[in-house]
DNA sequence: GCAACTTTCGTAAACGTTTACAAAACGGCC
DNA sequence: GGCCGTTTTGTAAACGTTTACGAAAGTTGC
């Protein structure tokens, strides 16, 4: 069933049918109704390829993820929930969402070139944004609208949404200091994802506020994975001059840290306090329950959808490029206690 | 950059260029090379809309998921890992994967009608298959190739892949019986997803093998969610004639059961043994570690990709419709112990 | 009844491919 | 060179839309 058959069936020209179906002005209310009715009856829906070809737009949003990344295997449902929420919003707006997996072993620039050239999406959501991100310069040149999940320092005309990693780190330090901690370690990613820089910035800011000198040996870089967390836990627990608190910028590492602590006979909270990053439904089964931050992933997903469609809006107001920081909520947990000497 | 510009640049007709790029026979090796080289240099990639329109195929696979479902919020990364693996395979074969979310509140048949009519995908992977599934009859009529993740009893010409729920339940019963359990409860989904029937079938088979009479009060239906598991745990722990073992057909309920047990002062393994379903990276933080089954989700995802592309093959051998059951591996855990009276 | 509008409709071109078909070039042979 | 068969190339139609443009029909005012 195509538009020609529908038009013939109605004894009407395809032009009029198309206008009717697309709510274009200048079609008689009576014919409009007839067309809509017939389309519903015959189950006509415009073919997407034909429409895309003519309009030069596909009504599809691409979501670029890095695959082959260990965190994906580590029970991190972050992306899944976010994708789901975003997808729901996009579907309401009659947009499709296509996942574009760029394997970490592949060249991301070449990958994007193909995506751009094929014209399969109207806009892109980029993830795993780096502090210096070549993909941004490439996309900016390509004219394909895009946004990033996570800020980058690479300039360009794009919107971004980021979690408040700096705020999280700052608050984590503040909460620890409030309880008497002065020797506070931090686990950072070992690659150059942007979040690591923001988290570190918040951490340094917190130390400065509290008048604590920076000890480089307490800034530890590990892969963002359970194994990375395990290694981090071992390192920290094995230090001769143990820190009294450990801040984590990812929840996947938390599980590993707990496992390492368990093996070393170190108890989170009692021996070394922990502030994890994102509250996670399964986190409650870590014992003692980690202090962490609640993030509304549903809202994040929806905001991603809204923001990416804003890019495509004709409305000068809406399609303005903008950055947005998603707030988080601190959740106290048993893993954050006063340091050993101050415990009663 | 379109094919015409590329052809002009080479002083060649677009027909030849197209043939060259698509490896069609009858193009001079020399020109073939020239075309390929120029395409690479100028970054030409065929526009997907134009190609789809002409070919009547989109090189896109649709993955239909049910959203608005509580399990999605419950830290169940099952789909995510599967999607990732499938997507990786499809990308290798130059296929895109688009997620098609059907909200549980919407009419799935109407939803599919639109998907079919728009011609946005070459084939579909259906999930959350029901025992009697109207979508299957609809798709069978539509000529759109599709497969299901999970068997259905609705007949139709389609391939399916399923986890061996029956085998899991049977093995679970066998393992429990081996330790001396006779009073074995089971938690089943409260809707008509097909897996519930298979799981129950295996459970009944196991009881029959062991010569245990079926006690209907031990067959408990709850929503497949943490809350459902919580409710299940409460019910089981609160029974006057407690079962000594509880089998779970989903790992999301496991967390809830543990939480309920914790509140009721019941210890898994010691008081009531538990056999969960799928091994899950975060499951190790449940204490005591649950007995469960290991499933290679990566392999499952890849098989899904292979199977769905088989549907589109010209090869009579390959495009045969077929069913496949993914085997699982039993993982003993501390949550499965001999029943109270037999413990030493 | 007619001019001057306005509303509604039909026609045809265009989007970027692929491919059937015809035309051209080529090679071998007499 | 002329003929034939094969290889290679060019041309044009087709896929299903949307939309600019002009034509037709309808409305108003005189």
Image (cartoon, coloured by chain):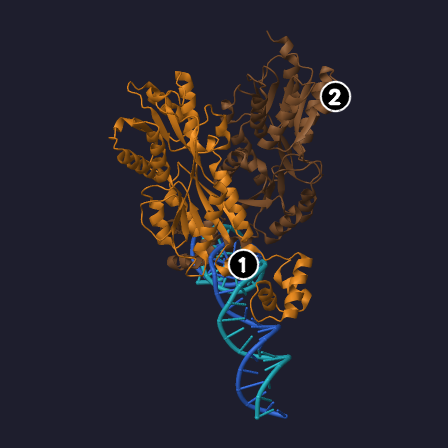
Chain colours: A orange, B brown, C blue, D cyan
Front residue of A137/A305: it is A305
Chain at tag 1: A
* Quadrant position of the C terminus of chain A in the picture: top left
Pinpoint residue A274: horizontal percent, then vertical percent. 39, 27
Q: Is residue B134 above or below residue A181?
A: below
Residue at x 57% of width, y 52% of height: B56
Q: Is residue B343 above or below residue B257?
A: above
Q: Is residue A163 left or right of residue B335?
A: left
* The quadrant where residue B131 appears: top right
* The quadrant where residue B73 appears: top right
Front residue of A317/B127: it is A317
Residue B264 visible in this rendered orientation of the protein: yes
Q: Residue furthest top?
A: B344
Front residue of B125/B157: it is B125
- What is the total number of numbered labels drawn onto the structure image? 2
Q: Which residue is denoted by mark 2 in the rendering?
A: B214
Q: Is residue A155 left or right of residue B245?
A: left
Q: Could you tell me which secondary element the residue under label 2 belongs to?
A: loop
Q: Which residue is denoted by mark 1 in the rendering?
A: A51
Pinpoint residue A250: horizontal percent, then vertical percent. 40, 33
Pinpoint residue B57: horizontal percent, then vertical percent. 56, 50
Chain at tag 2: B
Mark-to-mark CA distance, 2 and 1: 59 Å
């Amino acid at each position: 069933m195509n538009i020609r058959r529908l038009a013939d069936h109605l004894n009407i020209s395809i032009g009029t049918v198309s206008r009717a179906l697309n709510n274009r002005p200048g079609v008689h209310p009576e014919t409009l109704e007839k067309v809509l009715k017939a389309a519903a009856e015959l189950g006509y829906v415009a073919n997407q390829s034909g429409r895309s070809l003519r309009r030069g737009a596909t009504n599809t949003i691409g979501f670029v993820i890095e695959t082959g990344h260990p965190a994906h295997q580590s029970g991190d449902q972050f992306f899944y929930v976010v994708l789901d929420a975003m997808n729901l919003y996009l579907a309401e707006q009659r947009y499709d969402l296509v996942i574009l997996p760029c394997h970490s072993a592949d060249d991301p620039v070449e990958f994007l070139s193909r995506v751009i050239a094929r014209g399969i999406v109207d806009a892109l959501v980029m993830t795993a944004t780096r502090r210096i991100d070549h993909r941004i310069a490439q996309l900016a040149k390509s004219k394909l609208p895009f946004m990033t999940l996570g800020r980058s320092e690479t300039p360009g005309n794009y919107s971004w949404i980021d979690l408040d990693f700096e705020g999280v780190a700052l608050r984590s330090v503040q909460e620890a200091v409030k309880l008497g901690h002065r020797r506070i370690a931090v686990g950072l990613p070992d690659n150059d994802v942007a979040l690591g820089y923001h988290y570190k910035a918040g951490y340094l800011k917190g130390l400065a506020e509290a008048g604590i000198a920076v000890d480089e040996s307490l800034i530890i870089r590990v892969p963002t994975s359970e194994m990375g967390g395990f290694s981090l836990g071992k390192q920290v627990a094995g230090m001769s001059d143990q820190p009294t608190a450990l801040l984590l910028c990812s929840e996947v590492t938390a599980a590993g840290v707990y496992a390492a602590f368990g093996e070393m006979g170190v108890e989170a909270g009692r021996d070394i306090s922990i502030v994890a990053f994102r509250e996670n439904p399964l986190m409650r089964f870590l014992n003692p329950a980690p202090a962490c931050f609640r993030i509304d992933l549903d809202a994040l997903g929806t905001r991603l959808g809204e923001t990416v469609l804003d890019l495509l809006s004709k409305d000068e107001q809406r399609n303005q490029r903008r950055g947005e920081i998603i707030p988080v909520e601190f959740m106290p947990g048993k893993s954050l206690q006063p340091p050993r000497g101050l415990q009663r």
